[in-house]
Amino acid sequence: MMKKAIYVGIIFIILASGAYVAYKQVEALNMARCLGCLAMEPKTKAFEDFWVEYPSFYTRSGIPEHPSWLVNESRQHVTMLFFWFEGCSACKSQWERMKKYGLVEGGEADGKFTENFSYAKLITIDIINSPQRDALKIYQTEGRMEAPTTVIIFEKNGTIYWYAFSGDANGEGGRPDVETLVKILERAEEEKNGGVQP
Amino acid sequence: MVVCNLNCASCPLAYACIPITIAGVIALRKYRGRLQKKRLASQMTFLFITNTAFLFGATGLIYSYFYCWESPFALMACPIGVLEHAFVDKAWYLLIYLAGSIGFTSIIFGRAACGWACPIGFLQDLTSKRKTKSEWDKKLRILKYIILAAIPPASYVTGQLAYTLICPIGGLTATLPHLLMNPHGYTFTFFFFPKMMVLVGFFILIVLLSRGWCRHLCPVGAMMAPFNKISLLQLEYYEDKCLKCFKCADVCPMQINMPYDTKTAECIRCGKCVDVCPTDALAFKFQWQ
């Protein structure tokens, strides 16, 4: 009788069945700001020294509340976090650049440092699906979910030192290029353990 | 939730209200007729709802119209962005959700979201009423379907949000607001100038042609357009009452062949023809049969 009512019903069922899984995914995608998609990247400050407290261009001040799992990691070794998500062009470009340099191997999801850099540990965090994704808000300048973001962090004598930047590591806008990134890693290892072991 | 701190300079609500109020005041004179006043109220309400991320955060709902979800205030997700992500991430269930979201509003209201809710449609209502006599107008309307059809393969092959990189709506509603809010905070990627060029082209188009974006290029409009033929809300034409004065054809912002072609995919249900008709030969009706 009501042909159109049936159409509406069918569409509603499709919506309801799809929504069950998809709503959370779209919500996460919506929270993850991809400035690279907007043809822009955030400016950062060039690396001078590791930070203990938030630097002045962050919207917060004081010592960041580092998550406990990261504190544990940073006690053991110099740790680099790489926040990314599928479909983020700038994340892909940074990952390819690091791969080409020989810094990392594998895909973003299960990537790790190559043998030459095995003194440090790489943790890649998918900001849509990973349970550790909330850590990003701590290290992003404005407290936003913004990819790609790279964080280098280590602990020495109970103090946590860190450096972070958002956007592709291409040496523009104050961000380090991959070569500088490696130097920062080596510097971190030097400060933590007195240098890279041969 | 935002609690009023009696300091308007730091209140996001104040920032959202100022442009909406200005748009409303400019628009008031352009909206003549009973339905048009309601439509203006609807467009302003949706413009406000669209930008309420500071109240509710970013949700997982999908707009049934075009607005960039990377915008600093965007409440919901862009349908084209979701489409691209479905193909880039190979997350096919997003397609079901997208089809359901767009389908649900479109099967009820047809393409009414273009006329009553879309902020970009609102902008075009304010920019131009110019019509064209060119033969090309009808032929070029197929462009929006071609763009829509090209987005999935382009995203799949490149592994990037291919349309977003040059999307003028993204440029207008996200790139520029981000830049305005933090002018020294960004550097530009390779796609910045192409994107701005497309944005300039978009402005030229909507100033030269009434609803030029909706007619020729909008991929979200292309998603909703086919639903016009089967939607519940229909524009009814009563031929016995018609005087054949063709006032409806004169006011139609989409230049549809009024009053005969009321079921066309191009109708955005704005109701200007209903308002202008001297004998009520045109009316909106919900058809269940």
Image (tube, coloured by chain):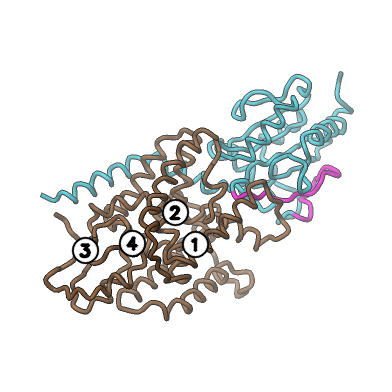
Chain colours: A cyan, B brown
Say whether disc 3 or disc 1 marks the residue closer to the N-terminus: 1
Chain for disc number 3: B
Residue shown at 38%/69% (left/top)? B42
- Closest to the observer, B93 or A73: B93
The numbered disc on residue B21 is: none
Which region is colored magenta?
Answer: A38-57
Q: Marks 2/4: CA distance? A: 14 Å
Q: Residue B268, which numbered label? A: 4
Instruction: Find disc 3 in the rendering and name its residue.
Output: B260
Residue on which the image places disc 2? B217
Regarding mark 1 in the picture, which secondary structure is present there?
A: helix
Subunit under mark 4: B
The percent position of residue B233, horizontal first and vertical second, equals 24, 60
Q: CA distance from mark 1 to mark 4?
A: 18 Å
Say whether marks 2 and 1 touch (CB < 8 Å): yes
**Residue drawn at (63%, 43%), measured in percent from left and top?**
A147
Judge left or right: residue A46 versus residue A7. Answer: right
Is A52 a magenta residue? yes
Callout 2: few (<14), some (14-19), or many (20+) C-alpha neighbours within 10 Å?
many
* Disc marking residue B205: 1
Kind of residue sitting beneath label 4: Ile
